[in-house]
Image (tube, rainbow, N blue to C red):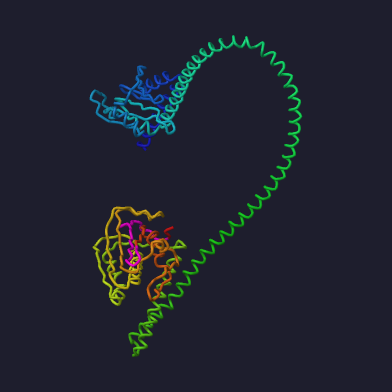
């Protein structure tokens, strides 16, 4: 309670000082009087040995002291004042007061401070007060109204003085021009006097002609007025027709907006329906795959070679169909803004070796060589989604390569991803690049931009058709951009091979899950 009472007393003291200052400053008239009253009363009420006001008049800089002396400055040499002009924040320096003989703690030290006077967004000037016994910084922070009031008052006076000076300069120029014009006019007047008599005769003749012309003009005006009135009635009819058309357009717009809302709802329901049905299909498929494996491995009895081949076909087809269903589920989640992200710490080397295991059998069957240029590197991102993207790219590389080499390499960069879309919170440099290169059939340059579209399958020169729905690369691009916060690049040449590069941030610190939209 004592602390609160003391703080309230200090606050009341500050308010009383500010109220006194504002009353005295508001009574002053003219820029010089306002500056003198302001500096004198701040020094009397707050205390201190010296006070200086630095202020701007147009682009010129001036300083004024408590004695009323104003000086035009070329630049600011005072570092404390210059800092306030540059950053527009009050700066106060505390130091010991060696000459003070007061024993109370509040007067055992002194302050020198500089405080900005800001009107709106414009810096009007800076007040520097030296050797204060109290901290003006606290007064400035508690009573910004006074400093804002003083800034606006000075701004108005400076503006008025500047406008008055400009007006005087303009008047001087006008007076000089008038004197020149008066001399020229005096010379012209004599010529005008000589010409006046001739003009009077001409005017009399012209007046008669104008009177005749005036009669004809009045008749033409009357006719034109009647035409304009008729035209006005026609325009009013056209305006009413236009208003009717606008009403019809507004009605059609409302109907289109309602239809658009229904279409969006239908699209959302479609995605939810696909996801739901895909989940329902996965359960029997998993049973088919599981029981075909049990039969193939002769867990419940022997089978001949032909039966084994058939069971392998069932299992392989079931896994392929399950993979397609999983892609459909992921696509529907992305479109419905329901994709989830789970960030965790893991080693990139372990993830890539795990991805290679998924295609080792196909590599061996095709006789392809695998080259790995990867190293251990800790990552913090969605491991499952990154693994899914790498497996998709590896599977495509093996699928479209008949002979040669599959290369997987990684490199760290300091480039922040720029996908053109919103990136996850926390995505930052450095980044990691994962490149999968093959010596396969390649892709035509004009077809590269279509690779990452949904349900797009390019024509393949391979003798046997490659299975797929055209969702793999579309899903990979979506996952990289919306979950992993990165981007994907493709370089390819027909008959030479293709190279796909994933560039993602090494670490994503966002721990939340749910919609990435």
Up-down: is 8 above or below 260? Answer: above
| Figure quadrant of the N terminus | top left
Is 513 in the magenta? yes
Give residue 46's position: percent from left, percent from top.
35, 25
* Numbered disc total: 0
Residue shown at 63%/55% (left/top)? 252
Instruction: Judge left or right: residue 82 versus residue 288.
Output: left
Residue 424, image quadrant: bottom left
Residue 317, image quadrant: bottom left
Instruction: Judge left or right: residue 80 versus residue 59.
Output: left
Name the one closer to the observer, 299 or 332: 332
Residue 466, image quadrant: bottom left
Per the rendered image, the range of residues in magenta is: 492-514
Residue shown at 37%/73% (left/top)? 462
Give residue 16's position: percent from left, percent from top.
41, 27
Give residue 418's position: percent from left, percent from top.
37, 53
Residue shown at 33%/61% (left/top)? 501
| Figure quadrant of the C terminus | bottom left
Give residue 402's position: percent from left, percent from top.
32, 73
Is 144 in the magenta? no
Residue shown at 70%/13% (left/top)? 201
Name the one closer to the observer, 499 or 19: 499
């Amino acid at each position: 309670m004592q602390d609160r009472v003391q703080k309230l007393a200090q606050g009341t003291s500050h308010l009383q000082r500010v109220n006194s200052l504002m009353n005295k400053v508001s009574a002053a008239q003219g820029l010089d009087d306002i500056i003198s009253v302001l500096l004198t009363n701040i020094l009397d009420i707050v205390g201190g040995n010296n006070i200086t006001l630095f202020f701007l008049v147009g682009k010129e800089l001036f300083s004024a002291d408590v004695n009323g002396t104003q000086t035009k400055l070329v630049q600011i040499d005072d570092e404390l004042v210059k800092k306030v002009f540059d950053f527009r924040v009050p700066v106060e320096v505390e130091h010991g007061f060696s000459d003070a003989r007061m024993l109370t703690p509040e007067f055992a030290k002194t302050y020198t401070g500089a405080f900005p006077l800001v009107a709106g967004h414009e810096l009007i000037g800076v007040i520097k007060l030296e050797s204060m016994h109290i901290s003006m910084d606290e007064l400035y922070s508690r009573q910004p109204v006074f400093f804002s009031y003083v800034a606006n008052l000075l701004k108005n006076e400076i503006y008025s003085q500047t406008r008055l000076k400009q007006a005087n300069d303009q008047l001087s120029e006008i007076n000089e021009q008038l004197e020149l014009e008066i001399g020229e006019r005096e010379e012209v007047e004599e010529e005008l006097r000589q010409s006046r008599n001739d003009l009077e005769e001409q005017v009399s003749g012209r007046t008669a002609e104008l009177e005749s012309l005036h009669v004809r003009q009045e008749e033409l005006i009357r006719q034109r007025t009647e035409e304009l009135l008729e035209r006005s009635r026609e325009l009013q009819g056209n305006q009413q027709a236009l208003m009717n058309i606008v009403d019809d357009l507004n009605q059609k717009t409302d109907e289109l907006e309602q239809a658009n809302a229904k279409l969006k709802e239908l699209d959302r329901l479609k995605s939810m329906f696909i996801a739901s049905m895909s989940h329902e299909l996965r359960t029997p498929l998993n049973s088919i795959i599981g029981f075909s494996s049990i039969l193939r491995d002769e867990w419940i009895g022997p089978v001949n070679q032909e039966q084994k081949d058939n069971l392998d076909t069932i299992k392989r087809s079931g896994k392929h169909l399950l993979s397609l269903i999983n892609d459909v589920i992921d696509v529907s989640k992305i479109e419905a803004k329901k994709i989830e992200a789970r960030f965790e710490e893991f080693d990139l080397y372990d993830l890539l070796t795990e991805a290679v295991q998924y295609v080792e059998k196909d590599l061996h069957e095709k006789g392809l060589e695998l080259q790995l240029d990867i190293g251990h590197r800790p990552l913090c991102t969605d491991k499952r989604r990154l693994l899914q993207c790498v497996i998709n790219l590896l599977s495509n590389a093996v699928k479209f390569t008949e002979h040669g080499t599959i290369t997987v390499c990684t490199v760290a960069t300091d480039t922040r991803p720029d996908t053109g879309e919103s990136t996850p919170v926390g995505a930052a440099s450095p980044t990691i690049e994962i490149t999968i290169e093959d010596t396969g059939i390649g892709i035509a340059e004009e077809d590269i931009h279509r690779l990452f579209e949904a349900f797009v399958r390019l024509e393949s020169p391979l003798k046997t058709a490659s299975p797929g729905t055209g969702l793999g690369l579309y899903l990979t691009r979506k996952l990289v951009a919306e979950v992993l916060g990165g981007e994907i690049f493709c370089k390819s040449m027909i008959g030479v091979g293709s190279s796909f590069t994933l560039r993602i941030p090494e670490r994503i610190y966002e721990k939340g899950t749910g919609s990435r939209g």
